[in-house]
Amino acid sequence: MNYHIVVCVKQVPVSNNLKIDPVTKNVIRGTEAGVMNPFDKNALEAALKLKERYGGKVTLLSMGPKNFEITLRGGLAMGSDEAILLSSRSFGGADTLATGYVLSEAIKKLGDVNLVLFGRQSIDADTGQVGPIVAEFLGWPQITYVNKITPLTDGFIKATRLMENMEQSIEAKLPVVLTVRSELNNPRYPTPRNIQLSYQKKITIWDEKDINADLNRIGIKGSPTVVRKVWTPEKHEKKTINLNSDPNQAVLEILEVLRAKNIL
Amino acid sequence: MNNEIWIYAETHNNLVMPITYQLITKAKEITNNKKIVVILFEGLNDNLEDLIKEYGPDEIMIYKNDFIKKSGDRVIATLLSELVLLRKPNSFLFGATVLGRSISARLQAKLNTGLTADCLDLSFEDDLLIQTKPSYGDNIMCEIICPNHYPQMATVRPNIFVAKKDLNKIPLITKITNLKIKEDKNIKVYEEKPLLSKGDSISNANRVIAVGRGAYNQKNLPLIEELALKLGAKIGVTRPLTDLHPFSVDDQIGQSGNTISPRLLINLGVHGAVQFTSGILKSELIISINNNPKAPIFDYSDYSFIGDAHDFIKALLNIFQ
Amino acid sequence: MNNNRNEADLMLHQMVLDFAKKEIKPFDMIIDKNKDYPKELWNKVLETGFLGLIIPSAYGGANFNPVAEAETIYTIASYNASLAFTFEGHYKTVNQLMKYGKDSLKEKYLPQATKRVFGFGSTEPQGGSNVLGISGSALKEGNHWILNGNKTMITNGGLAEVYLVLLKTDEDEISCFLVDDEMPGFKYGKREEFFGMRGTPVGEIFLENVKVTDEHLLGSLGEGIEIGNNAHYDARINMGAIAAGIINHALEIVVKYAKERKAIDTPIIELYSIQNKITEMAIAKENSKLLFKEAAQLKLENKPYAKLATMAKSYGSRAAFSSCDNALQTLGGYGYSSEYPVEHLLRDSRALQIAEGTLEKMVVEISTMINKESE
């Protein structure tokens, strides 16, 4: 069976120590370029392993501004064959629903895709929703939080889903959407040679016209959720309070604090 | 659109996951003009509604089927969407668990509505659900609303809210009989293996007891384990203890171990070396016990007890009896 | 500048940093204690293709330039100096094959250099880097050369499998040959036990009537001294990078410690005597970086770089040693203890004043170059 695997990737900020501009209420992004979402690297590694074993093609897919290109280049340097960046002003401001719609339309346009991989969530937004949304829009089954993959032949895939209390072993007929956990693998480094070779591979840019998007379903228009307020929670300076030296008194004091804070 | 808040009951074998109860209690707290309805899918021989009703929702809708859990997320989401289209609830809440997140996102797409993940707080302004959640690694908080689409959906992390029984309320039990489960021939759960080891790591724990060299001895260990059980806390250790029974590297907190962000962290006999403290900085409330007044851990603590860990543990256990 | 190359260099830099933090950092002290590289680490080094960093793509390499090469060494040296020293020894040798080897020899051996470590043998038991004192010989016999000699103090000796050796082909004539440890007559000698850089094997080889074809002669007859000198200059860029990397490492340790450690209630980083040391180390780091980067840039632009390269090593080696000494003093008892990383940094840095030419030799060479320039 010929695999055409699409790996959906996102570029995330380098650090999570972001501050809010008190005037514009916008997040002040650092000047450092972003990096590929770590879980997406696990997804890409899984795709590359499948390709190495069974043949086929790996395509990176991402929705974002032009500066996402460096992340796609990094994915090409890990070994992907080609990359597609969905970039347009009208995609901006999208929530998970609008993002999922755009990605799924791009996958439909590619036509011969039989497996789509996502990281389980992005480390900036942390929603973990886009994978299942894309699966739903494609009409494909999904296996989320995958920590093991053993594909079979004949167009079936076997994967293990790691949940809080148990591991589910699931068999599904392709095409399927998977979201993967970091326990799945150790992503390979982009080797120096592959970094150079990645410049011979193509990054294609698509906008809403290329995917024939319904303009009501993209960007802000296509986003049911709205952020209405953003703020930095106060970091308290830890000036420690000394508890009573009698342990019995001390624990009563603690109990009061725990109740007041709604921890107990 | 009616005035119902739906809650998807998350269950595992014969247990109801605590997040279900926590959502019921929270939903009751934040509204007095909406009905709280729990959606329960269970096996033919289960009666989990008997456990759920102790938390006093207004209604429990039950669908009994032995195969539903083995048919994959898509089938569950489809069933839920049919129910939603029948009754059109105002909001639908799920636990931010593997299952909850996977099903709710799929359902969101089916219903073309908004879903906010990992909410730390919920409230109502009339019929508008205000969803508060962290973003960018918990350094920024957002308030999110879904003003024009229904149901308004949200997932909530376990142990954010507290569950409280309400035996005064007798819920209406509704059996769903007219739903047909469309088997998904393309996917099958063929095995389920329970996790014997500490399945979810300490890094997700909401309450943690950290044990350091100062508190590790054979006298304290059983007491610490009892305390952990009573508090619903996970036990973590400093590096030197990772070689000592019953701990391992998986239990380590710190730079080369786990980073934790619990609401409550109790440090017992922990000195507070940088390698440890760098893993606890996002803890909400830190209480440290050490008999060395100069221990650096106190610089990172909200409350300090200078004295013997053993005495403190015993005193704490006493008030929990 | 080619935009693509800039981005590729950035990606390389990020990858090397990630690799160093994840794969090398945990083993820094272990490498010193065990005097070798853990198998898992070495396998990852090979898999990632570090050995082929500077080799042209046509031969299976990654085709990165001297600046990227030196910066890679700098990053690795910031986490483990021995491994950086191993890379330095390999790259210096491969550079000579690339520059002086016949096409047929390059086609045969450059692809191998992406997987097998290369070493350069010039020193002999009687002589130091004084190339003219060489007694190892290469005698012509029909279409072949018969090689005899004993080369010592080879960086990576024992780990490397292919060697460039400087041998006497005639009275006052030194030439350079490539030998492969699979050749009959090739033998390994002992491994040195050194004060520092204990992960880098340094060893000796014996050539007993090793027979090679003309193809194995690098450059032309008598070009051995030039090749040897060129190897030194290439090496010194990276030795400067290693020095800067060691200072980088030591500085990081000192700052972290000084912020935590308190003298009564004051973190010692607020005390003048410590601030003095930290400032000196920080400036030494910037100076060393500027020198090796300038030397590498000159090489990239095909301009003469021998002087800058020699200065980079000369300055960097002393600055690294005194920075590590300052670091040790700052950490006091912990600095002197073998359970903390500072003392092995000091021992590692000491090698830089000797390897690839002693400090004294650097003085002579630099002032000779300056003298020549002013003619």
Image (tube, helix red, strand yellow):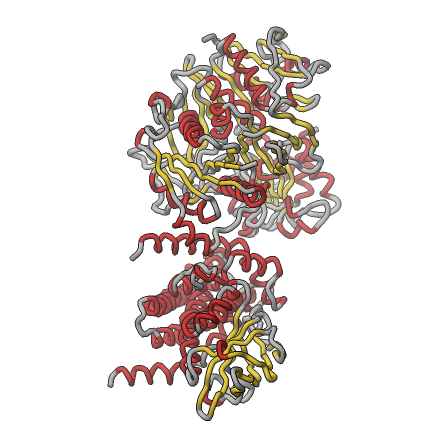
Whether residue C263 appears in this view of the structure is: no
Position of C289 compared to B102: left or right? left
Of A37 and B234, which appears nearest the observer?
Answer: A37
Could you tell me which quadrant the N terminus of chain A lies in?
top right
As drawn, A245 above or below C145: above
| x and y percentages locating residue C262 in the rendered image | 49, 58
- What residue is rendered at 50% in x and 37% in y? A5
Relative image position of residue B200 (x, y in whole percent)? 62, 36
Q: Nearer the viewer, residue B47 or A115?
A: A115
Q: Position of residue C252 (x, y in %)?
A: 46, 60
Q: Is residue B110 above or below residue C296?
A: above
Residue shown at 52%/32% (left/top)? Answer: A114
Specify the quadrant of the image occupied by residue B68.
Answer: top right
Decide: is A225 above or below C160: above
Residue C117, visible in the rendered structure: yes
Taking the view exactly as shown, the residue that stands out farthest to the bottom is C171
Quadrant housing residue B39: top right
Residue B233 versus residue C182 in the image, above or below: above
Q: What x and y, as percent, mark residue C248?
A: 44, 63
The C terminus of chain A sits in image quarter: top right
| View extreme (front): residue | C142
Identify which residue, B153 or B188, lies in the foreground: B188
Q: Residue at 55% across / 84% down in the picture?
A: C147
Q: Residue most toward the left? A: C375
- On screen, residue A234 versus residue A179, left or right, reads left
- Count of marks overlaid on the render: 0
Q: Nearer the viewer, residue C114 or C102?
A: C102
